[in-house]
Amino acid sequence: MSRLIVVSNRVNPPSGAGEESVGGLAMALAAALRAYSGLWFGWSGKVAKTFTGELTTRTVDGVTSAVVDLDAADYEEYYNGYANKTLWPLFHYRADLTAYDRAYGEGYQRVNARFAETLAPLIQPDDLIWVHDYHLIPMARELRRLGVKNRIGFFLHVPWPAHQVFTTLPGHRKLVEAMFDYDLVGFQTQEYQNAFEEYVVTEAGGELTGAGRLRGFGRTLRTGAFPIGLDAAEFGRMLKSAKARQMRNLMTACTVFRHLIVGVDRLDYSKGLEERFVGFEAFLAGNPDMRRQVLMLQIAPVSRESVEAYQEIRGRLDALSGRINGEYADVDWNPFRYVNKNYRRDELGGIYGAARVGLVTPLRDGMNLVAKEFVAAQNPQDPGVLILSRFAGAARQMPEALLVNPNSPEEIADALKRALTMEQPERIRRWEALFDTVQREDVTAWRDAFVAELSGSEDRVTALAS
Ligand code: F6P
């Protein structure tokens, strides 16, 4: 079996003890790597005075990682800049928040080149290389420049936007052209794959040549949809842990005679938190008889704090949560708990297990693994109801959830009422179908499908010659 080299911006080898919190990418990659002898390469998360390319390696829970520090300009231009102020908002349809700054683009290219130069000496001839997410789109191009001939695959964890949105990016063509140095490019859903192919066909005179092959820029690559899943077996074990049990008991005790509604998201404008808060407020306003029967808990650990848009949304959410409690709380009761703390995954599992409703309403989301974790954590005899945004990639696999338009607080309020009054047989029926999908289409299935496709892709030389 070939060695697998995974490359991602964040490298977060799990301890295996359930300590990780929100953010499924790291968990999924660790699970993918455990089965292969391989290497996980990327940024250390640290900023040094100068870039030295010096590697720090360690092995945790069977996963070996090799990480490198960035310098201050890299951090500002590549991570805060092009990744988080340009590509992230654009790919989540927030052209209004997208910064178009040449220095960011240069920093992005520079870090991709630096990563490639640091990684190239570690690559052996049979290695499969799997690059992840929007931070590292030009990585294959940089590796090829250094003479790397291995098979290289790319997986995009976030949405690929519609043609009209993507073309607002200066240099869009160069970015896509660089993707043709991969052998395989994978997306979370068919919809994102289609959007990418449409771009190549209309903007670059590309052509679909059958069997998932796309021709463009004088080259051919394979594309595919590979919906990422949970490490369901590992999460199942976590749910049985003492930490998970304690948290479930705690939440059950503080919601006696009340139903818990839960949301868990990184504090990010793509997650639809403002609309969700207003949706809950509309539910309280429209259902006076049900007010005292519910407690909504929103966990939202702060994220990317050096980017202004994140500071601004934090302020707005503070104000909204205060407004809701100010309007509806009583001396002995309050309807809303808004918490910016980070929780361990096993604790989150306990919280999901105590909840009657999981409220997962991003405005756009590549997949959303919280939706899957909520389902995995339910009691089969008395499961809670998942309310899910139709704009999360997960909605394609989870039609038995109550699907809503996350832009509409009224729809969210209606779905809350429906979920809270849903009879047990219907809750069980819906949950069984969802649970089956979560177990079957798990992270192992995702990894195996991608790696099989990448290993099976024709030799690069043949592909280039075709
Ligand atoms: O899942 C999308 C993603 O951007 C990952 O690539 C990233 O690790 C995660 O969200 C958290 O964001 P950040 O690494 O910027 O804290």
Image (spheres, grey):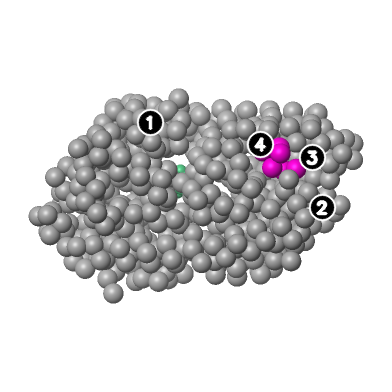
Kindly identify which residue carries mark 2: 254
Tell me, for residue 239, which label it has, or none.
none
Helix, strand or loop at disc 2? loop
Residue 336: x percent and y percent? Answer: 75, 39
Numbered range of the magenta stretch:
412-417
Please, which residue is most extreme toward the bottom here? Answer: 1
Q: Residue at x 40, y 56 (%)?
A: 226
Please, which residue is most extreme toward the right here? Answer: 331
Query: Amino acid type of disc 1?
Result: Val
Helix, strand or loop at disc 3? loop
Asked if disc 1 and disc 4 are in contact, CB closer than 8 Å, the reply is no
Locate the C terminus by quadrant: bottom left
Nearest the viewer among 310 and 197 is 197
Tell me, for residue 165, which label it has, or none.
1
Kindly identify which residue carries mark 3: 335
Residue 348 relative to residue 311: left or right: right
Between the residue at mark 3 and the residue at mark 4, the CA separation in whole angstroms equals 19 Å
Residue 245 seen by the camera: no
Kindly identify which residue carries mark 4: 411
Query: Amino acid type of disc 2?
Result: Cys
Between the residue at mark 1 and the residue at mark 3, the CA separation in whole angstroms equals 39 Å
